[in-house]
Image (cartoon, grey):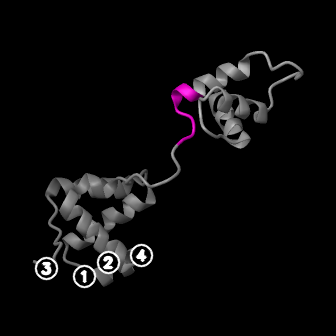
Amino acid sequence: MSDKKFSIQLSQEERQHLHRLISTGREAARAINRARILLLADTGHADPSIAEDIGGCLATVANTRRRYCQDGLDAVLTERARPGQPRKLDGHGEARLTALACSDPPDGHARWTMTLLADRLVELQVVETISAATVQRTLKKTT
């Protein structure tokens, strides 16, 4: 047994699950790499040799070991939510935008433009600010 702080000892079921995950190749490359790391660590390989075998870095191996020991197999194989800009329009906002785009355009305009729709959403207090590009992406997605 290794004297590592985060020693990996997989159950037979976990080993089988990881072998299936790797052999099918239907999972994300990151999940497959993490599975390979766990299998190699379980057989007693050192972190530098694991990193070399998978073509990764030591930090990836160490983080995978730590995460498995702290959070379990499912946590290692799934991606964590990454930070990012929150969505401008939720489901209700998208519905309002679609309804607005399907309605008659304002007086003096033959049709709705992305800018007119964006301005109208702000005017109706659906959102504080929104760009014409976001309006276009949302409409493209919902139609």
- Residue under label 1: 46
**Which badge, 2 or 4, is on the more N-terminal residue?**
2
- Mark 2–mark 1 distance (CA, rounded to whole Å): 6 Å
- Residue under label 2: 50
Would residue 115 be found to the left or right of residue 43 on screen? right
Q: Are marks 2 and 1 in contact (CB under 8 Å)?
A: yes
Q: Residue 31, percent across and down? A: 38, 58
Q: Is residue 64 above or below residue 126?
A: below
**Residue 2 got which mark?**
3
Residue occupying the point 84% across, 23% down:
111
**Which badge, 4 or 3, is on the more N-terminal residue?**
3
Q: How many marks?
A: 4
- Residue under label 4: 56
**Which badge, 2 or 3, is on the more N-terminal residue?**
3
Q: Looking at this rendering, what residue extends furthest in the left direction? A: 1
**Residue 78 got which mark?**
none
The foreground one among 15 and 104 is 104
Residue occupying the point 43% across, 50% down:
26
- Mark 1–mark 4 distance (CA, rounded to whole Å): 13 Å
Q: Residue 68, percent across and down? A: 23, 62
**Which badge, 1 or 4, is on the more N-terminal residue?**
1
Based on the picture, tell me whether residue 122 belongs to the magenta stretch. Answer: no
Q: Residues within 10 Å of mark 1 (few under 14, many from 20)?
A: some
Q: Amino acid at mark 1?
A: Ala
Q: Residue 58, percent across and down? A: 35, 79
Viewport quadrant of the C terminus: top right
Viewport quadrant of the N terminus: bottom left
Residue span colored magenta: 87-93
Would residue 118 be found to the left or right of residue 29 on screen? right
